[in-house]
Image (cartoon, helix red, strand yellow):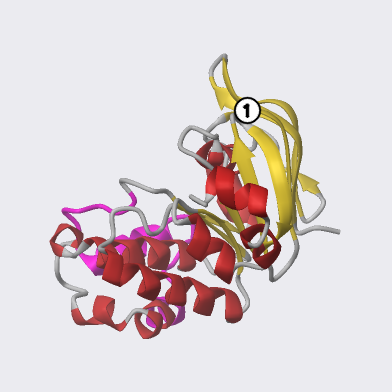
């Protein structure tokens, strides 16, 4: 049984349908990437899973439980963490305050998880008393991931984690995501840097015009001539 499974999903915003019959599965411990051109519906898949986009048809199950149309706060309680592409930290609050907000659904903030985040992202520990808005783009992405990890999710959903980063920081960001997965957290990621994402993941999906186009191991998709020409720039 898959940890997370999307079947025949039609989803969008209100009456606007963006996805048509999308299928996706993620096994426990896997690292799965969704790629495709702008407007393909990649982010909408993530938003549908966490209850932000509207599910019009199909189903989303997590550990065998139907979470279709579940409220976002309830999805978090199920063990799914989500890092949106933009507006993913509170810029006027400190790093420490952002991490505490990441654990808002708990009665008390788990100090051991905060320490684990600081161990994983030492720069955040060094700047814990500084406003999040003063951090670089890469550091803000680390903070956003740290906030999601405060709840120790079984699966982490990442929406375009390398977006807006300087080219020399992209590799470091992917290294950190690799480490999160290797430590036992399942990762489902939407990513604009398709070549690098597919090189690192276990399996990948290619979406176009809101529909599944290809699914295979990351390396197989990278080496597929049609996929390269149509979606990876040759």
Measured along the vertical axis of the image, is residue 128 above or below residue 147? below
On the rendered image, what quadrant is the N terminus found in?
bottom right
* Depth order, front residue of 159/143: 159
Left or right of 96 on screen, residue 176 = right
Residue visible at 82% across and 51% down in the picture: 64
Left or right of 7 on screen, residue 15 = left
Mark 1 Cα-neighbour bin, 10 Å: few <14, some 14–19, many ≥20: many
Looking at the image, how many numbered discs can be counted on the residues?
A: 1
Residue with the mark numbered 1: 11
Residue visible at 33% across and 62% down in the picture: 141
Tell me the quarter of the picture where residue 97 sits.
bottom left
- Element at badge 1? strand
Q: Is residue 187 magenta?
A: no
**Residue 145: percent from left, percent from top:** 41, 64
Tell me the quarter of the picture where residue 110 sits.
bottom left
Measured along the vertical axis of the image, is residue 100 above or below residue 65? below
Tell me the quarter of the picture where residue 217 sits.
bottom right
* Depth order, front residue of 62/16: 16
Residue 205 appears in the picture as rendered = no
**Residue 54: percent from left, percent from top:** 59, 27
Measured along the vertical axis of the image, is residue 154 above or below residue 20? below
Residue visible at 65% across and 62% down in the picture: 223
Q: What stretch of residues is rendered in magenta? A: 88-115
* Depth order, front residue of 104/124: 124
**Residue 32: percent from left, percent from top:** 64, 60
**Residue 62: percent from left, percent from top:** 74, 51
Left or right of 64 on screen, residue 185 = left
Q: Residue furthest top?
A: 15
* Depth order, front residue of 189/56: 189
Residue visible at 29% across and 65% down in the picture: 167
Residue 54 appears in the picture as rendered = yes
């Amino acid at each position: 049984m898959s940890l997370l499974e999307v079947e025949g999903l039609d989803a969008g915003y209100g009456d606007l349908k963006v996805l048509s019959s999308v299928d996706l599965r993620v096994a426990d411990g896997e690292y799965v990437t969704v790629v495709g051109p702008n407007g393909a519906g990649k982010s909408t898949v993530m938003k549908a899973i966490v209850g932000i986009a509207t599910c019009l048809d199909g189903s989303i199950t997590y550990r065998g439980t139907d979470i279709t149309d579940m409220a976002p706060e309830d999805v978090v309680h199920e063990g799914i963490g989500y890092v949106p592409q933009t507006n993913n930290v509170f810029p006027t609050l400190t790093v420490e305050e952002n991490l505490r907000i990441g654990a808002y659904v708990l009665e008390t903030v788990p100090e051991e998880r905060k320490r684990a985040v600081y161990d994983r992202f030492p720069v955040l520990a060094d700047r814990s008393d500084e406003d999040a808005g003063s951090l670089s783009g890469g550091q803000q992405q680390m903070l956003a991931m740290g906030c999601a990890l405060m709840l120790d999710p079984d699966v982490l959903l990442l929406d375009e984690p390398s977006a807006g980063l300087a080219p020399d920081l992209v590799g470091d960001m992917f290294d950190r995501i690799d480490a999160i997965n290797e430590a036992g957290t399942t990762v489902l990621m939407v990513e604009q840097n398709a070549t690098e994402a597919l090189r690192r993941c276990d399996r990948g999906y290619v979406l176009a015009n809101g529909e599944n186009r290809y699914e295979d191991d990351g390396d197989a998709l990278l080496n597929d001539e049609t996929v390269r020409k149509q979606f990876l720039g040759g």
